[in-house]
Image (cartoon, helix red, strand yellow):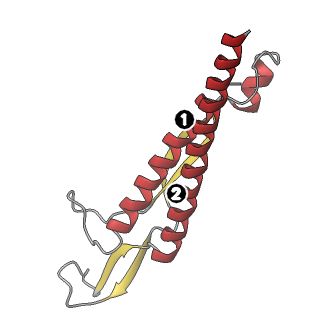
């Protein structure tokens, strides 16, 4: 088991998750993207590297956890909302404006959760490096 590799992969995933959340918050009131479409809120889906089926297929030779990776960045299923505002320049013929359905409080809660996971993995990297350094020190004394 390589503790550094596992925690570093988790750092990368959580950083990317924070980027997606920040993008959602930044676009929560936008009615159009550069291409003219409505922005669709996104979610990052992550999962284990290798996974259980890979461990089974390797005949159990895989030596434990391998870390995590980004599986996909997907649009949220309830990603758009319509608001009646006939004076808005992007209103449709019926007077409705389509905007991203981003809940600011939910995004902030997800941001705090991702930040805490990032901090925990950063602490794990530091602890693992300290353990490796101590092991080298002990090995030099013998």
Q: Which residue is mark 2?
A: 115
Residue ID at (34%, 76%): 98
72 up-or-down from 140: above or below: below
The disc at residue 8 is 1
Q: Residue furthest top?
A: 142
Q: Position of residue 89 (x, y in %)?
A: 17, 81
- In which quadrant of the rendered view does residue 129 lie? top right
Residue ID at (45%, 47%): 16
Q: Position of residue 130 (x, y in %)?
A: 62, 32
127 up-or-down from 133: above or below: below
Q: Position of residue 26 (x, y in %)?
A: 32, 66
Left or right: where 4 falls relative to 92: right
127 up-or-down from 32: above or below: above
Q: Position of residue 105 (x, y in %)?
A: 50, 76
Q: Secondary structure at mark 2?
A: helix
134 up-or-down from 8: above or below: above
């Amino acid at each position: 088991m390589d503790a550094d590799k596992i925690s570093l992969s988790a750092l990368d995933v959580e950083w990317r998750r924070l980027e997606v959340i920040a993008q959602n918050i930044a676009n929560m009131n936008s009615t159009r993207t550069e291409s003219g479409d409505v922005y669709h809120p996104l979610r990052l889906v992550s999962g284990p590297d290798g996974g259980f089926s890979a461990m089974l297929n390797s005949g159990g030779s895989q030596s434990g956890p391998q870390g995590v990776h980004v599986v996909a960045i997907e649009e949220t299923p309830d990603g758009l909302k319509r608001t009646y505002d006939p004076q808005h320049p992007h209103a449709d013929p019926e007077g409705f404006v389509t905007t991203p359905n981003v809940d600011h409080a939910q995004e902030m809660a997800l941001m705090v959760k991702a930040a805490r996971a990032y901090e925990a993995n950063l602490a794990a990297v530091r602890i693992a490096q300290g353990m490796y350094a101590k092991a080298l020190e002990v090995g030099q004394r013998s």
